[in-house]
Amino acid sequence: MDEEGTVVVRFEELLKDANSFPYLALVAFDAGGVLRLLFLLLLLPLSTLLRRTISQTAGDKILTFAATTGVGLEKLQSSARAVLPKFFAEELRAQPWRPFNGFPDRLCVVSSFPRVLIEIFCKECLGAETVIGAELHSFVGFSTGLLLSKNNGKLPRFSLPRSQAVARRNLPKIVFHDGRLAQKPTPLTALLIILYLPLGFALAFIRIAAGSLLPMNLLRYIFPLLGVHITVEGHPPEARPNGGTLIVCNHRTLLDPVFLSAALRRPITAVTFSISRLSELLAPIRTVRLSRNRAEDAELMRRLLKEGDLVVCPEGTTCREPFVLRFSSLFAELAGEIAPVAVATRPGLFHGTTARGWKGMDPFFFFMNPRPKYEIKFLGKLSSEVGSCGGHDLANYTQSVIAAALGYECTDLTRRDKYRVLAGSDGGRDVKVKKEKMKDGSF
């Protein structure tokens, strides 16, 4: 602490692994895909040589150049907001650290990382007032990959001992994440991902083709033969001779209705908020788009229920974290039987969801996992007494039932909260937050 009451800490001292490669690899893959990741990996030997012969700073500059050169600054800021915080949070040392645990003085974080990559995490998750790091040189809005001198070569003199670090419990409860990579990419992991991608894409193509072309009642048996592990617990609702059952589930992937249909061994209809035309084309079940008009959507869902089973995901968006986002109450206002279902995924290498990227690739990334796992828990139908509650009470009760079955926590955060954090929009197509016109409670 300095004489002005400012606590200064070096960012690298907070991390169990301060090696810059994994974090720059995450940025490289998010910004430029597999080719950018390959470029970074090819320059790793040169970086290692410079670290050993000249300095660690020289080696880090090579990796920073490979990961960021030619990348738009907005894209880097997007990666810093949506991709890196999860991995930074997981690497924070476990021993409590006073300045992040109610210490009243101002906090300054200094680092050799590019400032643009750590500033959002330090300010929004750690509560830092000032972040001083390496400055990336840019030209017409794009990074040149070159690092400028930090603070004219002068950094604050104060640093905390390495044994003092932030307690994970002092971070925000949910650190939303939107990167495609599910694991921290060490050099070996990055190499394996690059080598595996051609095989993974071929596997995904075969699995998607099987799901799109084969009869629905066979998928539960065919998918395991293709390496897709499906676990089903509980008793699925039986088909009704007149009308259908409203199946309400949490939302983990765009494939939720497909796996539910496979578990039921019959086709069902799914209402969607916004999926790509490619996903609609490949879907082996009927999908119907919601209009975002509450009255029109309610009437549409009533008509669909008269025709057969209908699945709805009231969170309105996928959620990777061990939480269930707040449910819209629209489904609770419909007449009929309601069957809550809890679903979960276990990704290996890739996440099959995105808030910022092209959603048409979501099924491919999910099925590119060597052995994707999908779990379904049928929780029975809600009793008539519970079903008569209606509105927000019924929506909240259903949310709590599903969360309890998964061991997740309920949260009041909504789809729009997630998109505001990850994408800077409310989740609609090309609709910015400052222009949002959606009403509370709509899908």
Image (cartoon, rainbow, N blue to C red):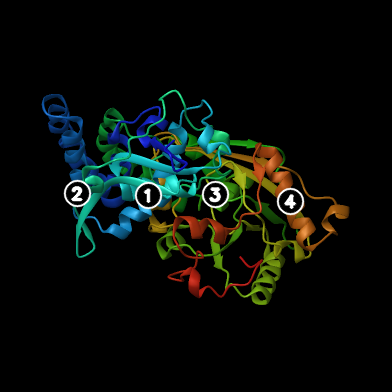
Q: Which mark is residue 398?
A: 4
Identify the residue under disc 1.
Answer: 80
Tell me which corner region of the image, top left, top right, bottom left or bottom right, holds residue 273.
bottom right
In the image, 84 versus 235, the foreground residue is 84
Residue type of the residue flagged with mark 4: Thr
Identify the residue under disc 3.
Answer: 319
Asked if the residue at tag 1 contacts the one at tag 4, i.e. Cβ–Cβ closer than 8 Å, the answer is no
Residue 411 location, x and y as percent?
A: 65, 49
For mark 4, does the 10 Å Cα neighbourhood hold few (<14), some (14 to 19), or many (20 or more) residues?
A: many
Query: Which of the marked residues, 4 or 3, is nearer the chain's N terminus?
Result: 3
Give the residue at x 50% y 33%.
Answer: 166
Residue 250 location, x and y as percent?
A: 62, 50
Q: Which mark is residue 102?
A: none
Give the residue at x 51% y 27%.
Answer: 94
Q: Is residue 273 above or below residue 372?
A: below
Give the CA separation, mark 3 to mark 1: 19 Å
Q: Nearer the viewer, mark 3 or mark 2?
A: 2
Q: Is residue 437 above or below residue 48?
A: below
Give the CA separation, mark 4 to mark 3: 17 Å
Residue 95 location, x and y as percent?
A: 51, 25
Residue type of the residue flagged with mark 1: Ala
Residue type of the residue flagged with mark 3: Cys
Q: Nearer the viewer, mark 3 or mark 1?
A: 1
Identify the residue under disc 2.
Answer: 148
**Residue 112 can be seen in this image:** yes
Query: Which of the marked residues, 4 or 2, is nearer the chain's N terminus?
Result: 2
Give the CA separation, mark 2 to mark 1: 19 Å
Give the CA separation, mark 4 to mark 1: 35 Å
Query: Which of the marked residues, 3 or 2, is nearer the chain's N terminus?
Result: 2
Locate residue 63 relative to residue 261 in the image: left or right.
left
